[in-house]
Image: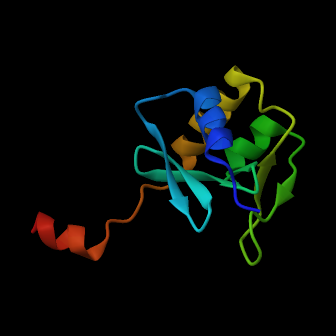
């Protein structure tokens, strides 16, 4: 089942950071980005956040699941979707720990 844009919009509204958080449609599902850093996915109208050590400590009772067949497990967030402050903090913690995205080769050529 493909995710619905209205669910993605709800998640983005809950997270806040309206200038930095964007989404990109991918195969009927959505990638969630903070600036250019992919931090989560919305698949089957469920929120998955990339796993980090700090995120694991913040969540404490982590539920992990694969967002789609063959994917690495991510943190499945279901219980706290209505808690804006909690969700916003989780995203901040996650984004701070994730590495910077690698530049694509075409962008590297442009910088030379």
Q: Is residue 45 left or right of residue 14?
A: right
Residue positioned 48% across, 56% down in the render = 99
How is colour applied across the structure in the image?
rainbow
Q: Is residue 108 left or right of residue 34?
A: left
Q: Is residue 101 left or right of residue 66?
A: left
Q: Position of residue 31 (x, y in %)?
A: 56, 55
> Which image quarter: residue 78?
top right
Image: 111 above or below 85? below
Image: 63 above or below 72? above
Q: Where the N terminus falls, by quadrant?
A: bottom right
> Which image quarter: residue 30?
bottom right
Image: 98 above or below 107? above
Q: Position of residue 84 (x, y in %)?
A: 69, 23
Image: 60 above or below 98? above
Residue positioned 55% across, 26% down in the render = 16
> Which image quarter: residue 112?
bottom left
Q: Position of residue 34 (x, y in %)?
A: 48, 43
Residue positioned 59% across, 68% down in the render = 27
Q: Position of residue 33 (x, y in %)?
A: 50, 48
Residue positioned 21% across, 70% down in the render = 108
Front in this rendered view, residue 69 or 92: 69
């Amino acid at each position: 089942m493909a995710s619905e844009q209205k669910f993605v919009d709800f998640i983005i509204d809950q997270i806040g950071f309206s200038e930095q958080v964007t989404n990109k449609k991918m195969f009927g599902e959505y990638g969630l980005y903070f600036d250019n850093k992919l931090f989560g996915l919305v698949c089957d109208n469920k929120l998955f956040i990339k796993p980090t050590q700090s995120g694991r400590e913040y969540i404490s009772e982590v539920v992990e699941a694969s967002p789609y067949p063959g994917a690495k497990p991510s943190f499945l967030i279901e219980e706290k979707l209505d808690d804006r402050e909690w969700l916003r903090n989780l995203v901040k913690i996650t984004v701070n720990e994730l590495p910077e995205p690698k530049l694509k080769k075409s962008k590297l050529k442009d910088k030379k």
